[in-house]
Image (spheres, rainbow, N blue to C red):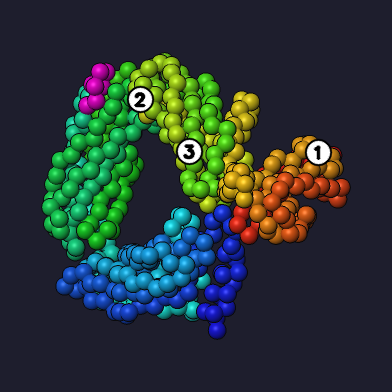
Amino acid sequence: MVKNTLIIIIFLIATYVSGQDFTGPSLVDFEFIDHSANVENGPDTIRFSISAMDDITGIGSCSVLLESPLGYHNAAGMALFLTSPLSGTAGGEIVIDEYVESGAWKVDQITLYDTYGNKTNYHQFLLQGSYDIEVDVTSNQDITAPLITGFILDPGPYETMTSPDMINFIVSATDAVSGLANAFVTFESPMGFHTAGGIINFESGAAGGTESGTAEVGVFVEGGLWRVNEITLRDIVGNDFTYDYLLLQMMGFPTLTCEVLSTSDILAPMMVSCEMETETVNIGSGEGLFTVTISGTDNLSGLKSADIRLESPLGYHTAASFLQFEEGIPAGTATGTGMIKEHSYPGEWTVTEIGIADVAGNRRSYDEFLLQMMGLNITLNVDNVVSVKDETGEIVSYQLKQNYPNPFNPKTVIEFSIPERTPARIVIYNTAGEKLLTIGEGEYDHGKYKVGFDASGFSSGVYYYRLITDKFSETKKCVLLK
């Protein structure tokens, strides 16, 4: 009964909106086929079965995360719904490694994905009592991390005036149960502007070992005395422990710093301008592309790349574009393209962040607030227009136009086009996505229509209006100023 109630609630939440998909799939059933695993002599496999439903683009895949009793270890598996059904059942496997913690392992999280990329997470507290989520694991457990027994650092100097250089180091460690796997060593510049790191691999499963490694320091980084920031040791089970600089000092390792000679560049580049070359993207018949141009300056190491991120109305969907400058130039312009996926939320998309980076790795970020202060209100209109032909061969479309006047007080006109006989309505929402009012609801023939929106009873602010038919929906933003 609890399981059925849960399914009904989730299904009601995942409502169908034609042309848009911003809801994840719903879990119908989950159970383990195997309820125990013995990993005393090697890894073992647990099989599971999962059923799900998705009412728009179809189910794509799922991931299942298992966690040990005290949380020391976990294991994960996947299941693929090969035909992307609206509802279906799939099977998957989870491999549990040897030396992990013994006892009753439980599903920590199930994540369902549709073919569009929307996901739904089901955490343990939601699954407990409704589904079969427990397996018993027998193991020669190892829950202790390796120990560091030695560290030697070549103090340099390392010269990076014209090309990168490699910091040399040696790590010794022990692990008495499952055995050693690797170590990761990171270094930090004097003021923390730049870092470098290197990984070494021990003989897998060895009880003890000593290995040498290197960490690359690039050009234009901050010069001076670099220090060991952290050393992380890991065994083959995944147990790890991190030794920071202070702990390494307390343990008495004599050399934890090295000298780096460099032409320092610790200043991030500046963005000069950003222009959206594409005014409108139509995703009515598939994904749509947009083009953006960003200009910037950097007087030391030179420009390298830029990125821009956009967000749909109400924040349901995002898009991004990554741009490459001619590497190392002090000033320049880069152009890139990005993609708005089919079924994304239509309307006026807003640029929420622009980043620009130089060759030295310095990056400056411009968030939405900073862009507004700079007078850059960069938007992209996303349409969901589905075109059809009438009996005369004329191309006509579903279309929702911008209201006029806008901003308005307190009345405005909303115009839309209908290519075929269909029921239609205009729904008004606030910025929280709450439905406030329905206007113009009725049966419409092919043609262009206007409906009035009287906001006398509403307070000043931003509102959204959506045209909804059986085959189409589109949303636009309007502003009420009293």
Q: Which residue is the site of mark 2?
A: 359
Using the image, determine if residue 135 lies above or below residue 149: below
Prevailing secondary structure of the magenta residues: loop
Which of the 4 image quarters holds residue 462?
Answer: top right
Q: Which residue is the site of mark 3?
A: 289
Horizontal arrangement in the rendering, residue 414 relative to residue 232 (left or right): right
Element on which disc 3 rests? strand
Which residues fall within the magenta stretch? 159-165
- Which residue: 46% across, 70% down? 87
Disc 1 marks a residue whose amino acid type is Phe
Q: Residue furthest bottom?
A: 1
Disc 3 marks a residue whose amino acid type is Leu
- Which residue: 57% across, 32% down? 279
Q: Earlier in the sequence, mark 3 or mark 1?
A: 3
Q: Earlier in the sequence, mark 3 or mark 2?
A: 3
Instruction: Single out the mark in the foreground, 3 or 2.
Output: 3
Viewer-proximal residue among 424 and 155? 424
How packed mark 2 is, by other alpha carbons closer than 10 Å (few <14, some 14-19, many 20 or more), is many
Horizontal arrangement in the rendering, residue 313 relative to residue 121 (left or right): right
Q: Which residue is the site of mark 1?
A: 408
Disc 2 marks a residue whose amino acid type is Val
